[in-house]
Image (cartoon, rainbow, N blue to C red):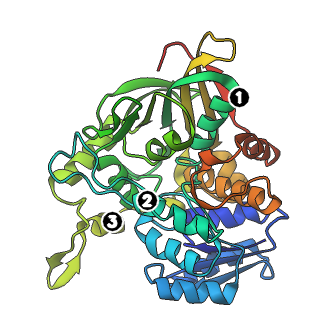
Amino acid sequence: MKVLVVGAGGVGAAFAAIAQRRDAFTEVVLADLAQERARSAVQRLGEPDRFRAERVDASSRRELAELIGRVRPDAVLNACDPRFNEPIFGAAFDGRVTYLDMAMTLSSPHPERPYELPGEMLGERQLARHLDWEQAGLLAVVGIGVEPGLSDVFARYAADELFSTVEHVGVRDGANLVVEGYDFAPTFSIWTTIEECLNPPLIWDRDGGFHTTAPFSEPELFDFPAGIGPVQCVNVEHEEVVLIPRWVQCERVTFKYGLGQEFIDVLETLHKLGLDSTEPVSVRGLQVAPRDLVAATLPDPATLGERMSGRTCAGTWVTGSGLDGRPRSTYLYHVADNEQTMREYSSQAVVWQTAINPVAALELLDSGAWKGAGVLGPEAFPPKPFLDLLGEMGSPHAQIELPGAG
């Protein structure tokens, strides 16, 4: 299959490196506003017949549609920040081509009661187009990274294969990654990190529907496997809370991230100073968004791999009744070891763990194991083929039984 990847940063480049080892991908086009970045990623792969670079402005639906028309891909993979989702999503629809992304359109807090009620929710603008895509016979697979993505697949797998009834689906993410030489160096896009962590976290329960809470609320100590150990996790806004209840019968869905107190302190300071704002301010006659300034002062996460050590764990904690009717508490998870991903793919663990999932999804779409029409999250598809394929790719998931009800 031929895939157009919009965005040649860490995740886009990692996707190409993983896809290079998979026979299903006959051609991959990496497109970026900085064409040299796309060219560099392509040159590292050393297969000019399968991989090539293009320039595109991801904020321009017209430019994107023109590029889709020239490339004529089987699928468009959006590997950009979610602020570019709407033009890429729209251009894929215009070009009548399958669309995938790893994060959904951004939210807007409730104007009067932000820590109680949701405003515009994550992905709302994309999900609102479901009927348009369905009636056109087109498919948009939204949120198919690791979180959201693999975490949603875990939830669906647990509901289908492990539980008779599901009470709580709690996505839990933690790591023991260390970046040598930096006091503060996020391992993923700081732009996206600020958006996720400082917006009011979303919680869903069957009785009350969607509601919000304060950032970093309800801290809990979660003991992560694979040698990571206990990490304090807090509520963070994430797409799984929107997506999972659409297809998985359960009573409650939450997302908690192991940020660490120092990371939380930095984010809270940025917020207090207004440095998380996306509204431009005048700086010596130039209009600069404070969040873009913060991003420009920090290292590119894609370049941190050589300085990183440790592992990152993404997983879904499911509680309820097992198939035998007895109480069950299971954590399904996937671990990426930075030493291994750097050695085998020259990609740091966090971006690699994100990128392997759209590779698997595209293969399943190509084979027909996954199919559908409309705007669908990963939990809408059969989970076992996905997990089996990850195992065949040498990156299997695991699961452990936990005490407690979640």
Q: Nearer the viewer, residue 400 or 260?
A: 400
The residue located at (62%, 67%) in the rendering is: 13
**Res. 353 mark:** none
Which is in the foreground here, disc 3 or disc 1? 1
Q: Earlier in the sequence, mark 3 or mark 1?
A: 1
- Structural distance between the alpha carbons of marks 3 and 2: 12 Å
Q: Is residue 49 above or below residue 108?
A: below
Q: Which residue position is annotated with label 2?
A: 189
Amino acid carrying mark 3 in the image = Thr
Could you tell me residue 233's position as x and y percent? 40, 32
Q: Amino acid at mark 1?
A: Glu
Residue 78 appears in the picture as rendered: no
Confirm or deny contact between disc 1 and disc 2 (CB under 8 A).
no
**Label 1 vs label 2: CA separation?**
34 Å
Q: Is residue 174 left or right of residue 399?
A: left
> What x and y, as percent, mark residue 171?
50, 35
What's the residue at 14%, 49% (across, down)? 112
Q: Which residue is mark 3?
A: 297
Name the image quarter holding the N terminus.
bottom right
Quarter of the view holding residue 77: bottom right
* Callout 3 secondary element: helix
Amino acid at circle 2: Ser
Spatial separation of the CA atoms under disc 3 and disc 1: 46 Å
* 10 Å crowding of disc 1: few (<14), some (14-19), many (20+): few
Q: Position of residue 218 (x, y in %)?
A: 31, 28
Determine the residue located farthest toward the top in the rendered image.
326
For disc 1, the marked residue is 161
Foreground mark, 3 or 2, reads 2
Which mark is first along the chain, 2 or 1? 1
Q: Tag 2 or tag 3, which sits nearer the N-term?
A: 2
User: Is residue 68 rendered to the left or right of residue 250?
Assistant: right
